[in-house]
Structures are given as C-alpha cells and as structure tokens.
Amino acid sequence: MSRPVLELVDVVRAYPGSPPVHALDQVNLTVTSGEWVAIIGPSGSGKSTLLNLMGALDKPTAGTVRVDGHDLRDLDDAELSALRGSSLGFVFQSFHLLHHLTALENVATALMYRGIPTAERRDRAAEALRRVGLGHRVGHRPSQLSGGESQRVAIARALVGEPALLLADEPTGNLDTRTGEEILTLFDELHDDGATLILITHDDEIARTAPRRVHIRDGRVTPHAEVLQ
C-alpha cells in the first residue's frame, strides 16, 4: 500500500490584518508515494502559499502539514532545512543554475551538504543527467544550453538526492510550447519510473497532463476539485 508523502489536514494560513487575510482556508490534501498531481488555480488563488507549505518553507497558522511523515509544527528552522534537503526536490520556472558551473557541477551542488565524497557526488550527478536525457551535455555551462536543456539540468538537480517528493512550480513557464511539451513528457517518464510529483500551474491544458488534478481558488480546494484520469 502506498504511503502518504504529503498530508494537509484542515490547513489555514492567515496573515495579520483587520481582518486577517486567509491565503489558505481549511485545505485538505493527501498525496501518496508514486502519484503525479497537478494543482491548478488562477493568480491569487493560494498556489504560492500552498507551495511554501508543501516545500517546508513555511508553517500553517492552523491545521497539520506532514511532509514525508514529519509534522512541520514540530520542526525548528534547522530541521526544516534538513527536511528540504533530504526529502524534497524543487523545480522552478526560472532554472536558477549557477552560470560559472557546468551542468554536472550544478547538479552535484544539491549533494554538497550531505557528507557525500566528491567522486560519488559527480557519479550521481552524471547518472541524474543521463536520466533526463543530458548525458552528452555534462560539461556544458548554462550559456551553452537551450532553455529546455537548462530546465532538464534543474530537474536532474532536483532528482539527484532521490527526494520523496518533487515540486515543480510553473516549470514550462519560460519555455516555448514544443519544449514545454518535452518537459511534460519527461515528467510523465519520471512518474512511470516511480517518482512522486506535484506540478503547480495556472494552465488547465498543462494540468491535464497529470493523472490527478486538484483545483484551488480563493484559498480553498474547490468542491469536486479532484479529477482522476
């Protein structure tokens, strides 16, 4: 039986004000190991706040958020940082690659603080790049890569630590349509290989590539929001 990798139970995230602003209000969501879920909503719907909670970058005002079995309320800042490093992989719209490093070195940086020897970090980075179809570009710097290749490097960097959950925030936003479709195909292949993925998007067409879709609006998961293919 698949285990929960992410659990949100009656989650509220409110910010001070008169009255307080509820960015999330009574959100319930469970994602189990091996799932690929798209979370879709318009600008201002609460997607970014939800991403911050799922990524252990913030804590709820009320309710429970568990990431890989860890209740965020029980963790201090150092423990939250350790959780992000061990259990989560992040892919963003902007690739956030270090321009003075090669693709191999960019991916290997994700393992720097785990006490892994340099040779092993490089071997694992090379394998991650092969996994995303860039085994032939390990020595290239970001300026020598296309946008799609740069995003593949970012995905390899997110995967190299074998995270329990991969979070992708508008990962095709800076790519042309054809290249974006290639990245979504790659996510489908990673899902087939057993990766657990959450894709954040405002685009219904992109969300339709995921087997499960969850709609959010005005800080709430909307009625009949979950769609399973």
Image: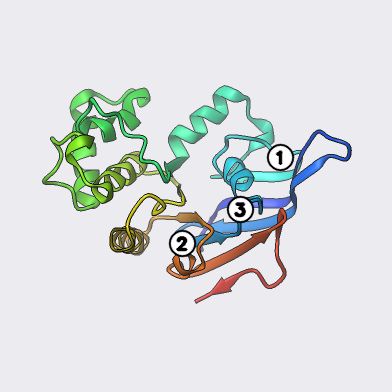
Q: Residue at x 81, y 33 (%)?
A: 16
Q: Position of residue 107 (x, y in %)?
A: 28, 35
Q: Position of residue 138 (x, y in %)?
A: 15, 39
Marks 2/3: CA–CA distance: 22 Å
Query: What is the quadrant of residue 150 in the picture?
Result: top left
Q: Position of residue 175 (x, y in %)?
A: 34, 53
Identify the residue position indicated by label 3 in the image: 43
Q: How many marks?
A: 3
Q: Viewed as shown, does residue 7 lie left or right of 104?
A: right
Question: Can residue 175 be seen at all in this image of the molecule?
Answer: yes
Mark 3 or mark 1, which is nearer to you?
3
Circle 1 residues within 10 Å: few <14, some 14–19, many ≥20: many
On screen, residue 225 above or below 118: below
Labels 3 and 1: the sequence-earlier one: 3
Q: Residue at x 57, y 73 (%)?
A: 227
Task: Please name the amino acid that badge 1 sits on.
Answer: Pro
Labels 1 and 2: the sequence-earlier one: 2
Identify the residue position indicated by label 1 in the image: 60
Q: Any mark on residue 36, and which?
A: 2
Mark 2 or mark 3, which is nearer to you?
3
Task: Please name the amino acid that badge 3 sits on.
Answer: Ser
Circle 3 residues within 10 Å: few <14, some 14–19, many ≥20: few
Q: Secondary structure at mark 1?
A: loop
The colour scheme used here is rainbow
Q: Secondary structure at mark 2?
A: strand
